[in-house]
Amino acid sequence: MHSFRYVGKELFCEEVPVSVLVKKHGTPLFVYSQATLSDHFTRLDSALAPLDHLICFAMKSNSNRAIIQTFAALGGGFDTVSAGEIQRAVAAGGDPSKCVFAGVGKTEEEIAYALKQGIYCFNVESEPELVRISRIAVKLKKIAPIAVRVNPNVDAHTHAKITTGTYDNKFGIQFENIEAVYARAAKLSNLRLRGLQMHIGSQLTEVNPFRQAVEKVSPLVVRLNNRHGFDFFSIGGGLGIVYQNALESGANGWWKTAAGKKILTPQTYADTLIPLLKPLGLKILLEPGRFLTGNAGALITRVEYIKKTGKKNFVIVDAAMNDLIRPAFYDSFHEIIPLVKKPGKLVSSDVVGPICESGDYFAKDRPLAKVTEGDHLVLLSAGAYGSVMGSNYNSRPLATEILVNGKRSAVVRRHQELTAIWGDESLAPWQK
Ligand code: LLP
């Protein structure tokens, strides 16, 4: 579902006119709908009800503590990728015993920290990491729960920078080598071989790659479970969302683009995978990120200038690639709509930020309602991999973030003071 919609000419997030938030908090501004967050979690959770399962929210997609708390309160666990993320999850009311810890480069300090916190499982990405975890567990007199991440070598048909399940990627251990790695792990001290994990890529809008991966890996899970006595199988994240025509898709029932193209729903995902997963008799873990947060967020920006060149109509806005890097980084499409609807013809426009890079754009040659200085535009589907990928490039402060719940709204990340940007820096002694 989608909680951004027009009432008359005005864009609302749930029951709050977004223009009221803009007036109060300025721009660039991230606005999140708690109803969408909860709705998406609950839809996925209910669709998977026939399975013993745990949704571990991939907090890399949006790690604001208010977002984490929302999922913790719904019983979610967390897919974390650093000690910082584990600490953040705990600080927001997350339960460490529902946290999995993934990533190819876990440091010794991070492993020790996670062990002391009592996390659910380490998702191990290499043999040297297994050895390292075992050594640290022995030293701390702990038993480390581990799952090896299998790379199933299945093409996820998604953007090259976000595909992870083929042998060209740095992730996981080759399918053919997995059993040997578990045999080796079984001989290492203080490890508990708790499950198997996989993740094939992000923004998958069809069910087939998921089905293929589960079909390919399930027999391996059965063999390993017989040998090592598993608790779980994690099928990773990757459920995609609608980016194009995102607003209409909200009105139409959020999984359908205005062009009528259906995208993968949690129900189809569950209906396809449950018959394959249920016979395993294991707990099933999932690690969705974008599906839970993507359509829950929007980035609001102010039009600063209109600059016409011989070729182009540039709409220069006050948000930039430091706020939302996805178009610059992946050529991603984000729907751009006016905060207040305007009548009139659409104008082909390039929406660009103020940063001194040609890559600092949000849209190219996009038909947009004609806007002028002081108008506001809204970039939809900015809840996932938006604020979390933000930076202070060009000494620009991180954007304010607002959480909406019905008629209520609250600042969940205050506007960053400029001095906070350089607050951790210092001059060298010889410069003083
Ligand atoms: N599990 C693992 C092991 C992952 O690597 C990821 C995402 C997820 C779960 C969550 O994937 P999701 O459900 O959100 O698709 N910054 C990029 C996406 C990077 C995804 C990285 N890994 C973007 O903006 O599209």
Image (tube, grey):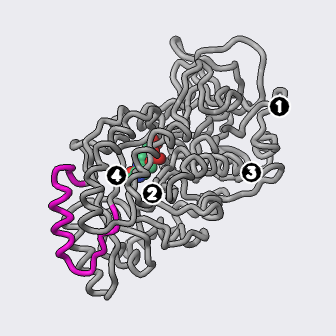
Residue 178 among magenta residues: yes
Q: CA distance from mark 3 to mark 2?
A: 29 Å
The disc placed on residue 71 is none
**Amino acid type of the residue that numbered disc 2 sits on in the rendered structure:** Leu
Mark 3 / mark 4, whichever is N-terminal: 4
Mark closest to the chain's N terminus, 3 or 2: 2
Q: Which residue lies at the image location 68% right of the left edge and 36% below the top edge?
A: 302
The span from disc 4 to disc 1 (Cα, nearest Å) is 43 Å
| Relative depth, front residue between 117 and 365 | 117
Q: Position of residue 415 (x, y in %)?
A: 66, 56
Which quadrant of the figure has residue 73? bottom right
At label 4, which amino acid type do we have? Met
Q: Does residue 275 sit above or below 134 in this rendering?
A: above
- Above or below, 368 against 303 in this view is above
Mark number for residue 7?
A: 1
Horizontally, residue 335 falls left or right of residue 154, namely right
**Does the beta carbon at disc 3 come under 8 Å from ligand 1?**
no
Q: Nearer the viewer, mark 1 or mark 2?
A: 2
In this view of the protein, can residue 264 be seen by the observer? yes
Label 4 vs 2, first from the N-terminus? 4
> Which amino acid is tagged 3?
Val
Residue at disc 2, secondary structure: strand
Query: Image quarter for residue 249?
Result: top right
> Which residue is the site of mark 3?
404
